[in-house]
Each structure stands twice: as C-alpha cells, then as structure tokens.
Amino acid sequence: MKEKPLLEIRDLRTYFYTYAGVVRALEGVNLEIRKGEIFGLVGETGCGKSVTALSILRLVPSPGKIVGGEILFKGEDLLKLSEEEMRTRIRGKEIAATFQDPATYLAPSFTIGEQTSDVIKAHLNLEKSSKRRRLYDRVIEVLKRVQLPDPWRVIKQYPHELSGGMRQRVMIGMGTSCNPSLFIADEATTFLDVTIGAQILRLFVDMNRRYGTTMLIITHNLGIVGEICDRVAVMYAGQVVETCDVDLLFNNPLHPYTNGLLQAIPRLDRDVERLKEIPGTIPNLIHPPTGCRFHPRCPQAMEICKEEPPKRVEVEPGHFISCHLFGKI
Amino acid sequence: MTLESLQSGLREEEEASSLQEIRYMAHLLFSNPISAIGAVGVLALLFVAIFAPYIITHDPFAIKLSDKFLPPSREHLFGTDHLGRDVFSRVIWGSRISLTVGFITLLESSIVGTLIGLVSGFKGGIVDSIMMRITDIFLAFPSIVLALAVAAALGRGLTSVMVALGITWWPLYARLIRGQTLSIREEQYIEVARLSGASNIRIMFRHVLPNCIAPLVVQVSMDMGFTILAAASMGFLGIGAQPPSPEWGLMCAIGSRYFLQQWWVSTFPGLAIFLSVMAFNLLGDGMRDVLDPRLRRG
Amino acid sequence: MKLRYYVVKRLTQLVFVLLGTSLILFIVSHIIPADPVRAAAGPKATPEELEIIKHKLGFDRPLHVQYIIYMANLLRGDLGRSIVTLRPVIKDLTERLPATLELSIFSLLTTAVMGIVLGILSAQKRNKWVDHLIRVVSLSGISMPSFWLALLFQMIFFLRLGWLPSGGRIDPNLAPPTHITGLYVLDSLLTGNIKALISSLHHLIGPVISQSTIGVASVIRMMRAGMLEEMTKDYVKMLRAAGLSERLIVYKYVLKNSLVPCVTLLGVMFGSMLGGSFVIETIFSWPGVGRYGTQALLNLDFQPIMAITLIMGVMYSVANLLVDLLYAFLNPKVRLE
C-alpha cells in the first residue's frame, strides 16, 4: 500500500491580473511529493516553477491570485486555511523556503543573529527565564547545521559582510531552523559559483539523509536534477508535462518537451556541431496556445494537440505524462 | 553599412523617439488626476497673468483714501487696502510679477546649471572636481539665507531677487545635469559619435543634452512652486519688490500690520500664492510620477 | 572603512567648505554692491563719515589684503558692528542664538515625529481615504507661504480663540528661567521652574507648528515612498515565508530600512528652519537671530546680514555633517565607500 504523499497539488491554477491582461501563470499543475524524497521541479525560466513555490506558501504577490485547485499537505488543503494559520503553523515551521539571490533576500540593516532569532522566536516558545541564552544557543546550532565555519562571528555580521555561499547557507539555516517537514529551495545555486553551489547541493543531500527533510528543488538546471534528485517533474508554460524517477527521465524521456530539453544539453562524449535547440520561444501566457500549450513547438504535434489540452495519464507506476501521444490507454 | 548611414540612422531614431516621448508624456500627464488638476491650475494662472488687463476691475495702482479698508463686497471682490486700492485687481496684476520672477529665475539657473553640469560631467577630472567643490560651497548655505544676503548686497528691487535666486538655485541644476551626463556618457551612441570624429562640444550639445531634458523639465516644474514661494518670502521681508508694486509677498507684509481688523488685505494675496504654488507642485508631482517609472524601465 | 576615518574625511571636507563660504561672503560683501562702502555705512552717512568708514574697513587697500584682514577678523570673532544696535554683531548674535536654536530644535523634532508617524500611516493605509487626506494636507503644507500660515495661525488661535499667545518666548509677567543654556524649556527643566516651563512650551506652539508644517510634507513623502518600496523588496518575501508576523516585518524591518534615508532629510530640514526663521520670528516676535536678520535687512545693515549668513552657513554645514555621520552609523554599508 503506497503511503500518502506529503504534498499533493491538484489542478492548481494561479493567475495574475495585470493591466496588460490576465496572465495564466499556472494552469492546472499536478504534483505529488513523497515523504523523505528529494523532488526536483525543472523547467525554463518563466514556466511557473517559482510561482508554484509561492502558491504552496500562499505568498503569491498581487496582482496574482490562486484561483483554483487544491494543495494537500499531510492531507490538509492549505488553500482552505486562514492566513493566521498559514503564518503560525505552516510557514517557516512545516514548510520552509529559500530563494535565489541571498543578497536581496536577507534584510540589509540587521545582523544575521537578529534575523535568525526572530525566525526562531516566531515559532518556538521558549520559557521566559533562560530565553535569551537558549535563543542564542539555538541560533548557533542552526548556523552550525548548515556548516558555517565560524557561527559565533557570523551572528554579529551583516548580510553584506558575507560571501554569496555563506549567505545562502544562512538562508537555508533560517529556513530549516524549526525542522520543517518540507523544504523548498528555489534556484538556490543559480547565483553561486559552481564549486560553492556544489557544496550547497551536498548540504541539501546531507539534510535530507540526516533529518529526513523532504526537499523540493526548483531549478532550470538539469544537471542539478540529475545529481541529487530522486524524482522530478518537468514544467512547461504553467503546467507539469512529465513526472517520473530521475533515471527514467534521463534514459527514457517520453514527453517531446523533455526530449527536447535533454537533446539541448551539450555532451562530452559526442562531437556536436550545433546545439540542438527547441525551435520557437515560450508562449505568451496572456493568450496561451489553444489545446496543448507546447504544440506550436512540438515536432510531433498532431491535429488534436491544437484543439484539446491533453489529460494526465500514468503511463507506468509513478510515471505521469500529459501528452496526446500517450492519451488513450 | 557606412559610418554616415549609421550616424544618420541613429539621429533619426533619437529624434523620432524624443518626439514620441513628448507626446506620450502629454498623454500620461492628463490621464493622471493629480497632474491634470495641476496642469489646469497652471494654465489658469497663465491665462490670468496674460489677460490680467481684461480681468481687473479697477486700476491696481489707483489710490483712493476715502475708500480705504472696505471689506470684500460685490464692487471690491477682495476689499480694499490701507490706500483704498482694490485688492482683487492688485492680486490679479501680481500674478504677472510672480510668474515672471519664477520663470526668469529658473531660466537663468537652469541655463547656467546645465552648462556647468554638462561640462563638469563630460570632462571629468580636475574640472569636475573644482566645479563640484564650488557647488558644495554654494549648497552649504540654506538657499533663502544666501539669496537674502546677495539681494541685500545688490540693493532692493525685483532684479536683485531674480539674480539672487538664480545664484542660489544653479548648483542644484548643475548637480542634476552632471549626474545625467555621467550616465549618458557611457552609452553607445556617444562612442559612435566620438569615433566619427565629432568634437566634444558637438557631442555634448547634440547628443547628451537632449537626453537630459526630461529630468530637467520635471525638476523645473517642481521648482517653479518653490521659486514663487522664495520670491514671495523675500518680498515679505522687504527685499524684493518695492511699494507700490502689487507683488504678493509685499502685499502680505504690508497687510500683516492690519490683519487684526482688516484680515482681507493679506489673506487674499497669501491665498493667491498658495494656490499658484499648489498648482505647480501638483503638476510637478504628476510629471515626476509620469516620468519616474519610465526612467526605471530604461 | 572604519567610522573614524570617515569622520576625519568629512571634517576636512567641512573645513574646506567653510573656507569657501567665507570667501563667497567676502566676494558678496566687498565686490557685488555697487558701492560697498555706502552699503556698509548705511544710506544716511555723510561724505566725511564715508571716508572714515572707508579707511576703517580697509577699502582703500588692495583686495587680497582686504581678504586677509577679513579672515583675521573672522577668526578673532570680530563680525563688525551693527548700525542699528550700535553693538558688535557677535554680541548681538550670541544673545539671540539660543532662542533660534530652541525654536529650530523643537521644530525639527516635531517635523520628524509627525512626518514619520503620518508617513507610516499613509503607507499602511495606501490609497484609502486616510492616505489621500494625508497626501493632500502635506502637499498643501509645502505650497503654503510660511508667513501666510503663521498669520492665519495667529488670527485663528490668538485673535478668535485666544488659545495661544501672540508672541514672545514666555509670558511677559513671568521672569525667564535662570540662564544656563539659554533654551527656556531646558533651563526651566533644570531649575525645576514649572511655571516657566509651561509658559515657554505654550509660547512655542505657534512658531513650531508654523515652521513644521512646511517640512512635514517632505518627510511624509519620503517615509511613504520608502516604505512602499521596501515592502516590495525580496527580504520581505523571505521573512514572510519564514512565518514572521506582518506586524513585526513592517514595524521592525521595513521601518528601520525606510527610516535611514529619511535621516538625510533632517539636515535639509534644519536648513529650511534656519531660512524660515526670518519670517517666523518676525511674526511671532521671537527674539532670535531671524528677527535680528529681518531688522538688518530692512535697514540694509550690512555687517549683521553678512554675519548671519555666515553663521547660518556654518550651522547648516555642521548639521549636515552630523546627519551624514548618523547615516553612516545607521547604515553600515555606506562606510565601505
């Protein structure tokens, strides 16, 4: 009997009501993340990965709104909770996140210690008597956990005094300080050097193994996915097109878009004259293509692809795909 | 593609885009309620100043002691002052003075400031340092204070006020234009012009200057209000216009002696100042809102 | 760079600027007037008096020598003599300076507090009627001539309502508190003189509100714009994702980051307080430097005019320096430049 997934997103729709028109950023996102796994969410810039993360936390900035669907976390629909409950119970406590540019994501005029202790204070009730001491210890512990070399020094420093890698660790530390069940890392390594980024990835794996934290790794970099993720979902233009185990993704991609992505990766073992790119550009989300959103760029598009959006089908256990090529089973 | 065709192409682009920008600006200006009200107010003020001779009900300078201190009535809309002169007509006539002073002051300071700012930002180096030190020194005084000193040294009268205010305002424009010049200096089309052998002066005036116009216009529209206020304050202190001139600040000063009983003598000129400055401030605010997000876009 | 080096750097800049200001004033007082001698002597001097004054002031010496004399006098504290009061200007100034300082400080405090509070309110209730009201009122504030506002104030609160005194620093029937600093409020606090304290505060209301109204608008705008912009920043998103309450985020993090740029405004505000003192002190019969200056202007009494301009220039520069230092202290990043 399969265990219930930790996070289950069903038919999530998030729109942005702008002056130019309604941007249908997420149009029916479906996702299942199992407990204890490292789940990757991959796609081009603008496909809606970050919006998905924000939707889970219900932090979609205006003029955006979650207009439909369900987000079931441990069986509870997050979209039905009150703002107060989201803030006290979920955010930072059960579900935490870190974002891509730590330079701007840490408050500039406050020390690391100050910010981190505020995060901890928001969730954990420490007895009044030894509060300060325990808080201090807790912050040190958090900073140690993300393998910062000199936490006693870092506590007193300001964000601009730290290097990019250290800031990212601080963010991760702040995020995981209250032992969340789900940790979302949105483009955590994009702005870091490759070597530093690799360290951060190792940190994620470590956290997952040691504390059992379920991770949602959002990235546009297939390499990262290949390196640390167990399962992965591929997003395109606001929808999930394929979900499967990482090995399957690389060895037997089924969706034409996934195929295209993999073919576009330069390879060391082959001589290639030109990188094979997917023709065309990502669609306008105010007036998205009819039917399947990928059909204008798909080499295998059929008549039906223009008319009807494909249904989500489980091709093999754990392997989901939304494509008319695999429609009728 | 020859260098000439590249140049002329760029020139055309610049001209077309600056015309487009002006039209776009005008459109945005009137769609925003705040700046629209301001624009209407300013236009009304201009109308009043230009057509003053047709609007006034009495001769602004005619003294009639038998009619002194009459309260506002249908004949004397704003009442009369201590010499029996019609306050309404004087206020209307005073609009010409305020607008002229404001306009000339800003003209002087923007021209001087722009020239200095252009040269300073463009040349850089020692010239820049010296210019900036000089502006620092001028800016070390609160502007009114310096203006008062200069005007006092030059002797009483409106010309002194205009010169004095011009002297105190130019550093602000110099700084503004210098900043703009510094950022534009790095742009590509400057490189192109330079490569094609254009002299520095030509580059400064044909290429850098037109792109400084936008923030300059915003600044001028925002400063117009303050200039009128400054001139009025100086008039109030007796340094600006002299009696019997119907300058608003002066009228307030003279009227302040009688405000216990004859409140209308200083209230109406003051109100005129308030409304005029408000109109310019609304316009300036609106223009800043209009231009700001666009500036950020670039 | 460490704070210490920044301080030293700014101090040297200050010295340089002060030298420059004295030079400018020298130019203004010695070169610009068509007849500087007559300007210094006043309109009623006889030809003999003019000659005497000409020699006394050294106008018959070459220009650079004049400048040296001028600087030497300045450093000695000799700022000339007033034609009106017939006393050394420096004496007149030292007597009147505390009054102006007291007024400026209170006005600055009021402007800062009101501006920050209203700015926060305006940002929080963005685009609701409270916001619009505050914005309209603050815009009116900057558009109003200070003298007009002061006159209206007197008319309503003194004439019609009788709530406020017409002028002066303290009730004419009361003796001013023992002179320690010259600031009546401070002195009465220090000597425990409650009556004087209340009366001084009462007399401060009119002038302070007139002075503040003009500056408040700028502070409100800056706070409002600053806060609205800060709220869009990424760290706010991060703190929300971490589960911090909106209250904590706004009143601790956003506020601090928005306040810091407002600090620089304080310096400018001080400058406009100084400039506005001429008018306000005259209307409220406040015995400060501003009223002294107005008198000097009316009589074209040159030595005091130049002296006041110089003193205000110095005060303004020092104020700006302090503000810059405060800014560097609050915003650690600046020190790196």
Image (cartoon, grey):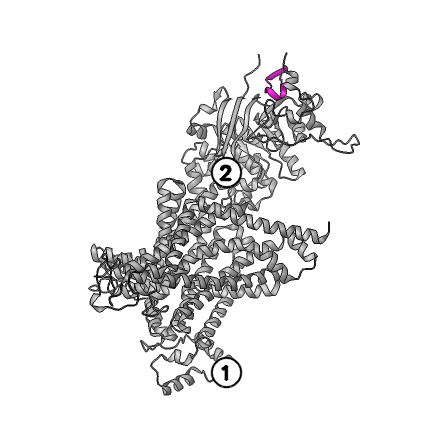
Residue depicted at x 45% and y 30% = A87
Q: Which residue is mark 2?
A: A116
State the residue in front, A269 or B51.
B51
Give the camera-side residue of A176 and C34: C34
Residues drawn in magenta: A304-321
Residue A233 position, x and y percent, is 61, 24
Relative to A234, is C82 on the left or the right? left
Q: Are marks 2 and 1 on the same chain?
A: no
Q: Is residue C6 above or below residue A69?
A: below
Quarter assignment of residue C105? bottom left
Mark 2: which secondary structure? helix
Looking at the image, which is closer to me, A206 or A2? A2
Tell me the tag on residue C62. Answer: 1
Give coordinates of residue B59: x percent, y percent: 30, 65
Q: Residue B240 at x, y = what percent?
A: 37, 68
Residue type at the position of mark 1:
Pro
C-alpha separation, residue under disc 2 versus residue under disc 1: 69 Å
Position of the N terminus of chain C, as image quadrant, is bottom right
Q: Which amino acid type is shown beneath numbered disc 2? A: Thr
